[in-house]
Amino acid sequence: MAMWGSEMEGVVCGSEDEQRFDEIIGSIQDVLISDEFLNLQQDFMDKYYHVFEDTEENKFIYTDIFQEYNSIFEKYLEMRLTNKLPWFSMEKFAASLTAHKHEICDEIFETLTSFTDFMTFKEMFVDYRAEKDGRNDDLMQGLVVQSLVPTTISVA
């Protein structure tokens, strides 16, 4: 007996919209981990990270950089997705994104919201600058690993 016999016909795992959303998220993940995207993002952040400061004040230039970032990365993502998924619509996806927030990996959600949420965008640059300036909070710094089992050295 075949596993997908006649009794299984018509059974769908999730709605078509849910399946498409999952397919979009998988494709977005592929784009976000691609060398091309990572290099594009790295180059952009290297170009502007020095402008950002970890203060409450938001300089006017931040807005210009944010708009440039949105223009470049949203268009890039949309181009890559429509090449892979011809039926993809950025507007429909953006409208459904908030409703599916808890179904998406935090890193993917944060990257996607950096296209539209200024504070997420600014935080990304402030964190990047801290890392470049050597001010990142490395929790491993200062830790010493020590064996709980005493070691003995035998001399023969």
Image: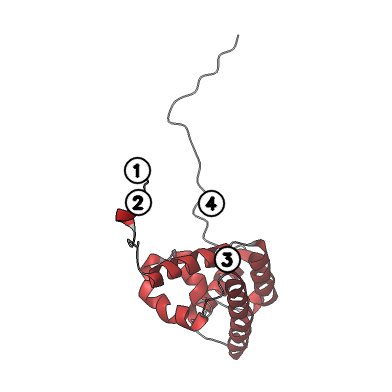
Check disc 3 and give the amino acid type. Answer: Leu
In the image, residue 120 above or below residue 152: below
- Separation (CA) of disc 1 from disc 2: 7 Å
Q: Name the mark on residue 141.
A: 4
- Separation (CA) of disc 4 from disc 3: 29 Å
Q: Name the mark on residue 1.
A: 1
Among numbered discs 4 and 1, the one appearing first in the sequence: 1
- Separation (CA) of disc 4 from disc 2: 58 Å
Check disc 1 and give the amino acid type. Answer: Met
Q: Name the mark on residue 32.
A: 3
Q: Which residue is mark 2?
A: 5
Is disc 4 surrounded by few (<14), some (14 to 19) or many (20+) residues within 10 Å?
few
Looking at the picture, how far across and down is residue 87, in whole percent?
52, 76
Q: Is residue 101 left or right of residue 37?
A: left
Q: Helix, strand or loop at disc 1?
A: loop
Looking at the picture, how far across and down is residue 34, in whole percent?
63, 62
Q: Are marks 4 and 1 in contact (CB under 8 Å)?
A: no
